[in-house]
Amino acid sequence: MNLFTFSAHFGDEEACRLHFKQERDEIGVKCRRCGHDQHYLIKSVWSYECKSCRSRTSLCSGTIMQGSNLSFLIWYRAMFLMSATKKGFSAKEMQRQLGLKRYEPVWSLVHKLRKAMGKRDARYTLEGMIEFDEGYFTVESSKVEQNKAKRGRGAAGKRNVAVMAESTPLEDVDSGNKSNQVRYFKAKVLNTHLADEINETIQEELDNKTIVFSDQSTSYVNIADFIELHVTEKSTKESTEETLKWVHIFISNAKRNLIGNYHKIKGKYLQLYLDEFVYKLNRRYFGDRLFERVVIANITGYE
């Protein structure tokens, strides 16, 4: 969806509210009091009234917009801007584009949307053949971290991220050339470098019938207990370019994206920025439909 199409369809507050209601009706609304799923809409106050117990639910109640004082029009413009570019918007740039005076509500808005994107992708597990590796991302370190600075793993200003990619090996019948076709990705910020957290990540993010390819890190020794097969390969230039090709492309592109668009990222918010990057990457072929998917993530992301 381009800017002109968006402006034509969502030029005022009521148009945004009506579209939001339409999307929410398709997903379904349940009464918080009795659980009934049949409602009337009282348009004068933009609230659903339960046909069973007469309890009312506001249009944005139960969505990530709940409790926000920003208008539907502002939220829709923000969702459009976030879905219109692969690179993303900083909160400061979003504030400028929306023409708002205060920074704090915009900062909260973009982080809520990122969190909703992450929750949407958390519903799915990767399956098939999986590339698995870790990358180090630069973040803004606190004074406490700087005082305890050390080299290598656990260094101040670095966060370790587990990256997973569905990667299917292909071979051209005529030429014999081999390649990997990639589908979906996941990325999770790790708190430690211990095998227990790696195992927990594998259980949460991957189907138990997957085949995982990784290097020979000592943190990966028990992965085979939770999947179909674990194939390890010594970390070399060839394995980076072939066996683990897509996770390294992801790490490189994600680092470039974050550095290029955001001045500094605090470590505790890194997962949210990665959630946005992964969400849009996994939907890279959606085109104009990406905006609609962000609206749906808004509606379901509060749960």
Image (cartoon, helix red, strand yellow):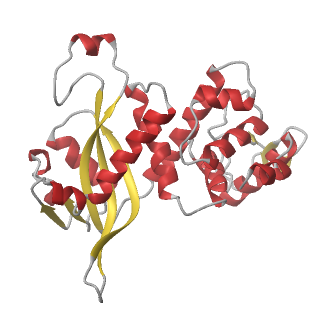
In the displayed orientation, state which residue is furthest to the front.
175
Q: Position of residue 290 (x, y in %)?
A: 62, 56
Which quadrant of the figure has residue 101? top right
Residue found 43% across the figure and 33% down from its top: 259
Q: Position of residue 167 (x, y in %)?
A: 32, 66
Q: Is residue 33 visible?
A: no
Question: Foreground: 276 or 178?
Answer: 178
**Which quarter of the image is occupied by the C terminus?**
top right
Q: Is residue 59 visible?
A: yes
Residue found 73% across the figure and 53% down from its top: 2
Question: Foreground: 175 or 207?
Answer: 175
Total numbered labels: 0
Q: Is residue 109 left or right of residue 175?
A: right
Q: Name above or below for residue 154 compared with residue 58.
A: above
Question: Foreground: 19 or 231?
Answer: 231
Q: Is residue 219 left or right of residue 288?
A: left
Residue found 27% across the figure and 13% down from its top: 146
**Which quarter of the image is occupied by the N terminus?**
bottom right
Q: Is residue 92 left or right of residue 59?
A: left
Q: Name above or below for residue 189 compared with residue 221.
A: above
Residue found 60% across the figure and 47% down from its top: 85
Question: Foreground: 297 or 39?
Answer: 297
Q: Position of residue 299 (x, y in %)?
A: 64, 47
Q: Position of residue 31 (x, y in %)?
A: 68, 47
Which quadrant of the figure has residue 196? top left
Q: Name above or below for residue 297 compared with residue 171.
A: above
In the displayed orientation, state which residue is furthest to the right.
44
